[in-house]
Amino acid sequence: MSISTNSELPPGTMISGRTRGQQYMVQRVLGNGTNGTVYLVSAIVNGNLYALKMGTYNRTLQSEIKLLFSLHKHWKETGKNQVNRYLYDADDYEEDGLIIPFYVMKYVKGQTLTNFLRAKGSENLGKAGLGVLDILRELHEANWVFGDLKAEHVIITDEGQVELIDYGGAIQAGRSLHQFTEWYDRKFWKAGNRTGDYAYDLFAFAVMCIKLFNEAGLQQIIATQLPQIRSVADLVSLIDRTPGLTLYADWLKRALRGEFKSTGEAYHMWKAVGGSRFLGSKSPDGDPVTRRLKNAFIWSIIILSIALFIALFFKK
Ligand SMILES: Nc1ncnc2c1ncn2[C@@H]1O[C@H](COP(=O)(O)OP(=O)(O)OP(=O)(O)O)[C@@H](O)[C@H]1O
């Protein structure tokens, strides 16, 4: 039986896998989730940084590890892009007679979608959303469902890549969801059940967009609407009252109503409405260098016109 520890490991702690023998040095804590603590670690074998998730007291990571193994196996067998994307190692570690399960995954360095849009501008939802839909499309085509999609699980890396973290909620299509967050859950909105299918993730994606642009409105519905009569209609009317979502309104309503035939269709429609909108430091006028060049050009036209005017005036 696995038992696990409750306290956080300090930087410098060495973690040695009992079965596979890999060793990791703790750098710092990255965060805490329901099932454990995530550490930034460096692998002794290659010096690379990884994120290592370790179980906390009275909880076990075993089912999460099992699930990730089968997802990883699938990616490997099908040669999908995601292989090596996530699971690097899984083992357990012994400390003072306690057996602590852990797994090691890719360290995703960047900003959460919420912070990214705050820093770079909400227009970036187009490209960022397309990145998320691309990952979901691949998962869904492989018959998996992400399950617990929310802005905190979407990371935009420093290179502008979109990544999902916390595959602990992923399930094979047709199974019951075991990890979800109320606001994003279609059953919470009486829009369907908790049996995993591609439409479940698309529903959560739509709520994620609404929350990003109008969290206060969402909070108000939840606080004032009786749970018995809470419905998708509340979300649809909130979309209509949220100017930042105008471009995506039709897409979002289709996702909420479960009207997409596939994630591929949802991906292409998103791409058509706003998926090519910039990601990173670019603004609607282009990047800062292009903008400066544009301004310089306008000023040189103005100065030239003034010079011409003066020259013509004094010639008379
Ligand atoms: N692969 C990763 N790379 C970088 N940081 C990560 C990674 N995985 C998790 N984290 C960080 O660790 C935190 C805890 O992650 P974890 O997946 O355990 O739980 P969570 O998603 O925050 O919560 P819950 O599991 O309760 O939904 C995350 O919020 C994130 O900041």
Image: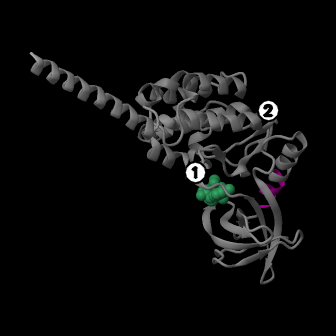
User: Which of the 4 image quadrants contains residue 294?
Assistant: top left
- The residue closer to the viewer here, 40 or 98, is 40
User: Which of the 4 image quadrants contains residue 243?
Assistant: top left
x and y percentages locating residue 118 in the rendered image = 45, 45
Q: Is residue 57 left or right of residue 257?
A: right
Disc number for residue 158: 1
Q: Amino acid at mark 1?
A: Asp
The residue shown at (84%, 55%) is 66
The residue shown at (65%, 32%) is 202
Q: State the SS at label 2.
A: helix
| Quadrant containing ligand 1 | bottom right
Q: Amino acid at mark 2?
A: Glu
What stretch of residues is rendered in magenta?
Answer: 61-67
Quadrant position of the N terminus in the picture? bottom right
Taking the view exactly as shown, the residue that stands out farthest to the bottom is: 96
Nearer the camera: disc 2 or disc 1: 1
- Is residue 261 placed above or below 85 in the rendered structure? above
Q: Is residue 137 left or right of residue 275?
A: right
**Is residue 66 within the magenta segment?**
yes
The residue shown at (70%, 38%) is 135
**Residue carrying label 2:** 141
- Is residue 56 placed above or below 210 in the rendered structure? below
x and y percentages locating residue 141 in the rendered image = 79, 32
Q: Is residue 242 left or right of residue 34?
A: left
Quadrant position of the C terminus in the picture? top left
